Structures are given as structure tokens and as C-alpha cells.
Image (cartoon, helix red, strand yellow):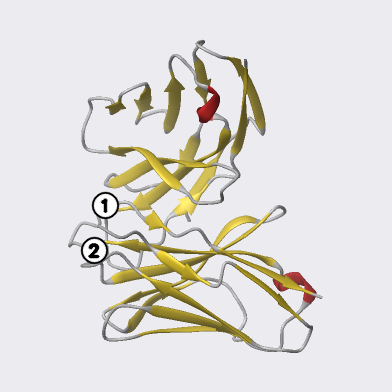
Amino acid sequence: KAGVTQTPRYLIKTRGQQVTLSCSPISGHRSVSWYQQTPGQGLQFLFEYFSETQRNKGNFPGRFSGRQFSNSRSEMNVSTLELGDSALYLCASSFRTGRLNYGYTFGSGTRLTVV
Amino acid sequence: AQTVTQSQPEMSVQEAETVTLSCTYDTSESDYYLFWYKQPPSRQMILVIRQEAYKQQNATENRFSVNFQKAAKSFSLKISDSQLGDAAMYFCAYRSAMGENNDMRFGAGTRLTVKP
């Protein structure tokens, strides 16, 4: 069973540019969550998508957005990049049930560096 | 809001010895799940162990076991017979079982070093 696939693994962007990151969840998982990981702030929740609908959103500015396609693949976009957006972006898929009794399976992340 | 606290930024253990990583959490809910994740230098977060709050029995996975104290809101991870491959960042996490909009909350992490 293939794991969670995130692309690309590394990205270097310039301030002001925009970036799109991709995540393909485990087959059968319809829930995809995104996290930003930095040394100072740790793991911070960005948003969760389930069946193409955003179910939950963290406390990030509107420059951060996402979407999910009918095949459950998800993308997140960051516009007008700032230096502080440099981070490891982790995608996690889960098999969502009524009681949310399963943990996440994470991808290897995308390391974004903004210069 | 639920918060997770890991009070040990770094821990060290000798190979083959036992180490315990601490985690406390704050919640007013009674139905939730607790997790320990391991993040090696390869960056991928790997699920180590999962505990359901309504189960009193502590979860175990081979060399990994937890001490779940619900009243004290404590969830420590014990690693027995430590191996060099156990060296990593370990994150404690909480996820509510109530409602639909529940993200997973993580502690700040504990960096575990294993000495040969």
C-alpha cells in the first residue's frame, strides 16, 4: 500500500512569489490535513480537507489556501511568500470515521525556503 | 482549547537501556485519542503508539509502551531496550473524538539521543 506522497521534496522561492505544494493520500483515505513545522513554532495546523470540502482551518492568513480534488489529492498554495513562510510543510492523511479514531499517516514533507 | 506539553526538550539514553518521555495535556473533554509520533532526520513523522482515552489499559507496541493517567492528564512513553534507530524527535499529540472539526494538537517535541 503506497504511503502519503508529497511533491516536491524541496523548493526555493523568492519573496513575493507564490508556491503550490501537492499531496496524494493513502488510497482510501479521504481526509487530508496540512501542517507547517518550524523550529520556533513547532507543528501548526493549517487546514483539513475531506471529500473536497474544507472541514477545519487553523490560524493562518488568507495567503494560505488549499483544495482537494475528487481523487482525494490535495494542494496547498501560498501566495506573496514571506521569509517567515520558510518551513517544512507536512501533509497527513487519515481514514475518517464518525469518531475519528485513527491517527494520521504523514508524508515526508516539502521543505520550502523563501529567500 | 486543548494543549499538549512536553517538558523535556532533550533526553539521552544508553543503548539497551530504558527511557521515559513525558507528556501532559489539558482538555475538558472525556473522549479523545493520544498519540506518540517519531520524526527521524528523514523528516517523516511515524506513528509509534496510539491510546484511546476510554480504554484504561495502557497501549503497548513491542518495545514501546505508554503510561496513561487520565485523571492526571499524563501520557508518557517508555522505550525499552533502546536502539540506535530510536534516535529521533518524539512528539506527543492529542485529538478529540468529539465533533467533526478536530485537528491534531502536538507538543513541542523531545529530541532523543541514543548513545552506543
Query: Residue B114, percent across and down?
Result: 60, 22
A41 over B76 or under it: above or below? below
Q: Which residue is mark 2?
A: A96
Q: Is residue B22 visible?
A: no
Left or right: where B87 falls relative to B26: right
Q: Quadrant of the C terminus of chain B?
A: top right
Q: Are marks 2 and 1 in contact (CB under 8 Å)?
A: yes
Name the chain letter of the residue that bears numbered label 1. A
Secondary structure of the residue carrying tag 1 is loop
Q: Amino acid at mark 1?
A: Tyr
* Residue shown at the point (70%, 72%) measured from the top left: A85
State the mark number for residue A102.
Answer: 1
Measure how far apart labels 2 and 1 are at the Cα level: 7 Å
Seen from the viewer's position, the closer of residues B94 and A65 is A65
Please count the marks in the image. Answer: 2
Q: Amino acid at mark 2?
A: Arg
Q: Position of residue B100 (x, y in %)?
A: 28, 67
